[in-house]
Image (cartoon, rainbow, N blue to C red):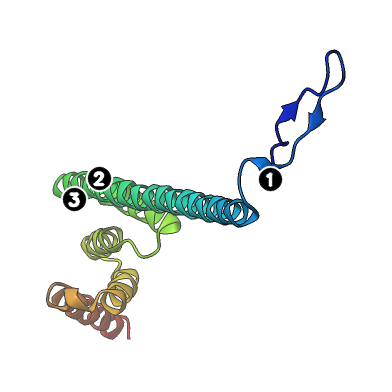
Amino acid sequence: MPNPPLQATARGAAPERQGVRGLMSPDQFSSLISELRGIKLGLYATAAVIVVSVALAAVRTYFAARHRLDRELNDMFNQEAQILFEKNELKQLAAQCRALLEERPNHAYARWYLGRSLLLQQEWAMALEQLTVLRRKFPDWAASIDPLMKDARSNLEGRERSAV
């Protein structure tokens, strides 16, 4: 709280403090203090709202950027995988899919292309395993996965019958 105003008493003498009595009544002073406390509280509340707003904006921006980056990386992977699949570079495709699945085990397209490449390499058991995991994690893909799983099962059973 600021000091009360100073008033000189005599020439060369040290000033003496004058109370607020001469400037305002105790009720006015009390009212002023109360109003200043209210303003102070309002400023604190405003500062808190600003800080929270900035924090929420930063979090929202982070998640939006992360989502966009994920989408872009997925698009890049899908394009690369499609090119390798079309060129019949199945071993390289399988290696890239496995590497991505190490980092992100729920990456649908990596598991999809891994299962398809294993099918074409006649690795029936491994293909069936990948497709089963994919089917369990992404049931809405069933229409695309089920025929491949059926093919892998029939080839696996045929190989087992011919081995006996």
Q: What distance separates the C-alpha of mark 1 from that of mark 2?
A: 72 Å
Left or right: 125 in relation to 112? right
- Quickly name the residue at label 1: 21
Nearer to the camera, 164 or 97:
97
User: Label 1 amino acid?
Assistant: Arg
User: Label 3 amino acid?
Assistant: Phe
Q: What distance separates the C-alpha of mark 3 from that of mark 2?
A: 20 Å
Left or right: 21 in relation to 138? right
Nearer to the camera, 71 or 62:
62
**Label 3 vs label 1, nearer the camera:** 1
Q: Earlier in the sequence, mark 3 or mark 2?
A: 2
Residue 143 locus on image (x, y percent): 12, 77
- Quickly name the residue at label 2: 72
- Quickly name the residue at label 3: 85
Crowd class of label 2 (few under 14; some 14 to 19; many from 20; radius 10 Å)? few
Q: Secondary structure at mark 3?
A: helix
Nearer to the camera, 52 or 33:
33
**Label 3 vs label 2, nearer the camera:** 2
Up the image or down, 134 lies above or below 18; here it is below
Residue 20 locus on image (x, y percent): 68, 43
